[in-house]
Amino acid sequence: MAQVPQTFFDALAVRTWCGLALRALGRAREEIDAINVYPVADGDTGTNLYLTAESAAAAVEAVFEAHDAHGSGKPALADAARAMAHGALIGARGNSGTILAQLLRGMAQVLAADGETTHTDGEGLRLALRQAADAARQAVAHPVEGTVLTVASAAADAAGGAEGDCGTVARAAYDGALAALAATPGQLAVLERAGVVDAGGRGLVAVLGALVETFTGEAARAVPVVSDLEHARVAGDTDTISPAGSGEVLGATPDECADAPGTGGPAFEVIYLLEADDTAVARLRQRLDGLGDSLVVVGGDGLWNVHVHVDDAGAAVEAGVEAGRPYRIRITHFGLGDVHTTGAERPPRERAQRAVVAVVPGEGLAGLYAEAGATTVLARPGEPPASGELVEAVRRAHAREVVLLPNDADLRHTAAAAAEQARTEGIRVALIPTRSAVQGIAALAVHEPERRFDEDVVQMTSAAGATRYAEVTVAERQSWTMAGICQAGDILGLIDGDVAVIGSDVAVTAEAVLDRMLSAGGELVTLVLGDEAPETVADHLEVRVRESYLAVDTVVYRGGRQGAVLLIGVE
């Protein structure tokens, strides 16, 4: 069905564009993954772009939902544009996703320049596309032609020469990007040898195609993934080309990729979010540039997304610690990824029969779950994972059967969507609706991979359901609760998701919560301490349980930066 076109670039157009871009990248994901040969042939460019766009779209949706909830109507263009850029920044994955985040940030700098403006026209879109291309190029330590940067610059150049409304400018940008994409094999030797266009550039063309559809209501024309050069080279010889989405690099072998694993390129990809000032980030760029390559640092206003390929992952993280506060750290060993190599170099890894995938709220619990054999997805406070990230975790688990533990009531629909997607890929997935990490711990404790899948799921579900959960947290604002009115800074005790106790002291509030929970009985108390928990609270609660509740055991874990001061489980 044709998309209803947007006349101006306003908040609704931002929302529409994000949704259409996500859909376009979803359709093209496998195709883009299959042609990914630069800078590392790890076959994940399409996936990384999709996850980045998904985070941007979710952030924009959250802004619209907030305005709906407060009855304030449609958000301003600046609000939607900033949300889009911030969502992409915190959700950026891989080299390509990081650059896409900076492209969106560059656009947002123009679109949100006047916070009171409700919309912009073709001229505003031209300026936004120019700023996007320039910002992305500045973020890359050593720009290379024949990549997404080239495609972005061509789109901006073409848009700059267009006169008319947003639809006219968007179409000019798309046509310019498409022509630049077709030329990438002639600019980058590894693409020419593989007979493909640049994967990141192909993804950007999909995003710009969505922009065209936003303003014209018409889908953009299809994009070829193999180069014109390759079409001519293999005329009548189709054996040298794999079909798009086959999971093989078209016409490429590992030794053709200068940065591919095993050919002298860095061994690790390191990505993290960083809270730091501009001066510290400038020093960080110099430090990381000396450690590796494919350095991209995007962001601003105190929050940055850092991406680099290095041999010493620890040194890259330490550099971030010296610059500020790094978090959401992801380290990928290229030798362990799904890099395109021949079967002789890397035999296919055998699928496990069963795995557990769990969302966890802090680094401490991530380590605990990993020790128990689970594949984890870290959920930072205020930054829940998107369905695409859960699907990637299910794939990473590399098993025929997967038990999915969302560990958060608000992730129910996200986890269900991820499970459904994984099932279409032939993976048997059971979703256990755990609403807290302590319920997940209980489920994982009774997990037995040797048991029949259905029996294992039943036992894990039963253990989770038999675990009451609570959390002690700090109120952010004045609010009505089931326990009365709380003020900002009050200590709240929530039992099974509802506020049951309002207090001023963590230990006292936690004790009151624990007493209420144990009044209904229990055999085991699980305490998960956040970074903000007082040092003495665990000892205080352990003594309380030991002296007041005979035959009840207590186990304590460190959860790290998990949002809540304390998580409590009673089985």
Image: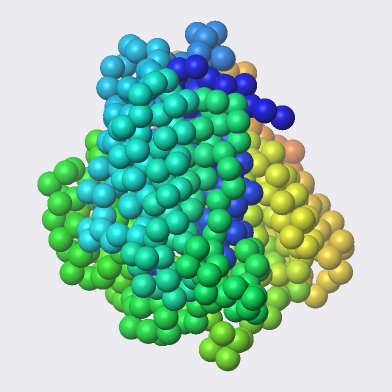
Nearer to me, 237 or 359: 237
Residue 421 visible to an observer of this rendering = yes
User: Viewer-proximal residue, 150 or 417?
Assistant: 150
Residue at 41 percent across and 65 percent down: it is 185
Position of residue 549 in the picture relative to residue 428 (left or right): left
Location of residue 176 (image quadrant):
top left
Give the camera-side residue of 420 and 219. Answer: 219
Please state, as top left, top right, bottom left or bottom right, where the N terminus lies in the image: top right
Report the residue at 87% width, 61% height from top. Answer: 454
Relative height, residue 471 to residue 373 (above, below): above
Q: Position of residue 255 (x, y in %)?
A: 43, 84
Judge whether 504 appears above or below 28 on screen: above
Quadrant in the rendering for residue 455: bottom right
Relative to 546, 571 lies left or right: right
User: Where is residue 60 shown, x and y percent of the image?
Assistant: 49, 29
Please state the horizontal and vertical placement of residue 420, each as a whole percent of the image. 75, 49
